[in-house]
Image (cartoon, rainbow, N blue to C red):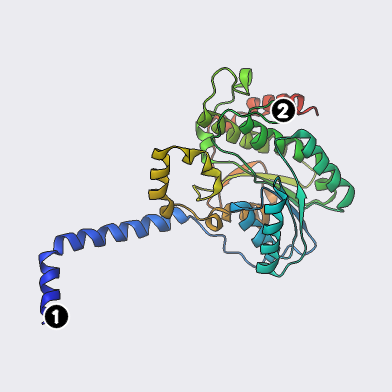
Amino acid sequence: MASTKIQSFIYNHRIALIAAAGVGVTLVCVRRYAAGVRYTNTTTRLDGKHVIITGANAGIGKETAIDLANRGAKVTLACRDMKRAQDAADDIKQITGNQNITVKQLNLASLKSVRSFAEDINKNETRLDVLINNAGIMRCPYWKTDDGFEMQIGVNHLGHFLLTNLLLDKLKISAPSRVVTVSSLAHERGKMNFDDLNMEKNYDSGNAYSQSKLANVLFSSELAKKLQGTGVTTYSLHPGVINTELSRHVAQSIGWRMLLSVVRPLIKTPNEGAQTTIYCAVDESLSGETGKYYSDCAKKTPSKEALNDENAKRLWELSEKMVGL
């Protein structure tokens, strides 16, 4: 009797059931596609190496730290919030068994903090093998850094620009070493507003974010030119669309919150989003490449604006003036 009822139900609702199954299969396929490529090399070791990761207390920064700690590296979490950073360090130690995890304060919205952090590293660390410029802020209101820069260009680019330059000597003596800078696909919408880099005349949070991510790619390519022959190589990357705290400013409106609640299950987890960062930091096949852009663990072609060598040089010179190098 029960079997007959089930068969009848299936027959009467067959179209709806087929549609539901189709939707389910589609969502599974979309989720698998969105997850991107995993970096499957787990054999490369980093014993005796020192890695610094900015913004490593959460999201893809923390996931990157876990992977590199598993490979035996000494990992320094460079973070603004020391409580959250220490909690993350404790988690990483417990997960990996690697006790060589340190925490140091770094506020990329303050050039004074960047200089203090770099001075500490240069004085107290014997080597630096990988610098991962990971921290960032996205689509925030019009805020300014301690030094008067628009927050997104200040944190995402200028803070990392100064940090990297101040640590170059340590990277050079540790060569072969790497600088990995997390950019975004959003760089493709970016244009460098050299006449108003702080966007004081016409601020749009999305445009400011895209400009800062374009700056990441231009910085990485110009840095590669300046480091030719030193053994220090550079990489910029798009990690993917990821479910992290980076979208917290985007999610302020009801409309965005509703949209994010729908798409979150279909976008990358922090672990999935960390794969290309790990690839750029670790993969031995990249030792002969420098200044390139990557996504899903493969070299990709960035936007036309990102390939403009003249703009890369102009941005470098302007950035030097702005941070006082």
Label number found at residue 319: 2
- Residue at point 63% right, 23% down? 197
Q: Position of 130 compared to 173: left or right?
A: left
- Residue at point 31% right, 61% down? 25
Looking at the image, the residue that sits furthest to the bottom is 1
Q: Position of 304 compared to 164: left or right?
A: left
Label number found at residue 225: none
Residue type marked 2: Ser
Residue ID for mark 1: 2
In the displayed structure, 173 sits above or below 142; it is below
Residue type marked 1: Ala
Give the quadrant of residue 63: bottom right
For label 1, the crowd category at 10 Å Cα-Cα, with few meaning under 14, some 14 to 19 and many 20 or more, is: few
Asked if one can make out residue 299 in the rendered structure from this viewpoint, the answer is: no
Nearer the observer: mark 2 or 1; the answer is 1
**In 3D space, how far apart are the residues under numbered discs 2 and 1 (Cα atoms)?**
74 Å
**Residue closer to the observer: 234 or 146:** 146
Decide which of tag 2 and tag 1 comes sooner along the chain: 1
